[in-house]
Image (tube, rainbow, N blue to C red):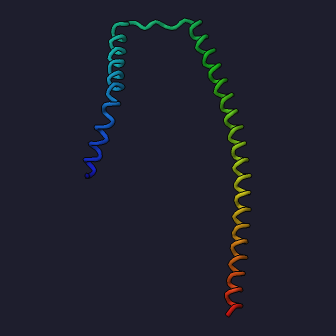
């Protein structure tokens, strides 16, 4: 099966799942165009609407900053934990290499001394 066969199989697998989303997007875009034509003049938002939008935006920003702060703390704790584990693993690797070298030296000595 060549490249075109693989691409055809991918399209055949993806199209049935993507078709409803594409259709919905096209219909929404058409509705938006018709609504903008029918609306004529766009009504300006009131000061109260703008104030409520700004308050909502400030709450969202505050919430995002809180989540970012928590994520930074999690990242720092994860980094320290990883560093601790890495140091432990490094010590174990050095110890195992030393043990392997010791056993290899003993084995070589016994083989040479026996002859």
Residue 45 in the image: above or below residue 18: above
Q: Viewed as shown, does residue 42 lie left or right of 91?
A: left
Q: Position of residue 102 (x, y in %)?
A: 73, 76
Residue 56 in the image: above or below residue 20: above
Residue 29 in the image: above or below residue 19: above
Q: Viewed as shown, does residue 102 lie left or right of 9?
A: right
Q: In the rendered image, which quarter is residue 98 located in? A: bottom right
Q: Position of residue 78 (x, y in %)?
A: 69, 44
**What's the residue at 68%, 81% (across, down)?**
107
**What's the residue at 72%, 62% (across, down)?**
92
Q: Quadrant of the C terminus?
A: bottom right
Pick the residue in front: 110 or 77: 110
Q: In the rendered image, which quarter is residue 25 located in? A: top left
Q: Position of residue 74 (x, y in %)?
A: 69, 38
Q: Position of residue 41 (x, y in %)?
A: 40, 6
Q: In the rendered image, which quarter is residue 23 located in? A: top left
**What's the residue at 55%, 6% (across, down)?**
46
Tell how many labels: 0
Residue found at the far front of this picture: 114
């Amino acid at each position: 099966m060549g490249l075109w066969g693989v691409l055809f199989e991918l399209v055949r697998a993806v199209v049935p799942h993507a078709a409803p989303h594409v259709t919905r997007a096209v219909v929404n875009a058409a509705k938006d165009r018709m609504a903008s034509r029918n609306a004529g003049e766009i009504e300006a938002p009131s000061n109260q609407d703008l104030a409520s939008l700004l308050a909502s935006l400030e709450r969202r920003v505050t919430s995002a900053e809180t989540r970012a702060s928590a994520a930074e703390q999690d990242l720092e704790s994860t980094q320290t934990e990883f560093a601790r584990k890495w140091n432990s693993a490094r010590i174990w690797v050095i110890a195992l290499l030393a043990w392997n070298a010791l056993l290899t030296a003993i084995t070589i000595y016994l083989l040479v001394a026996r002859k």
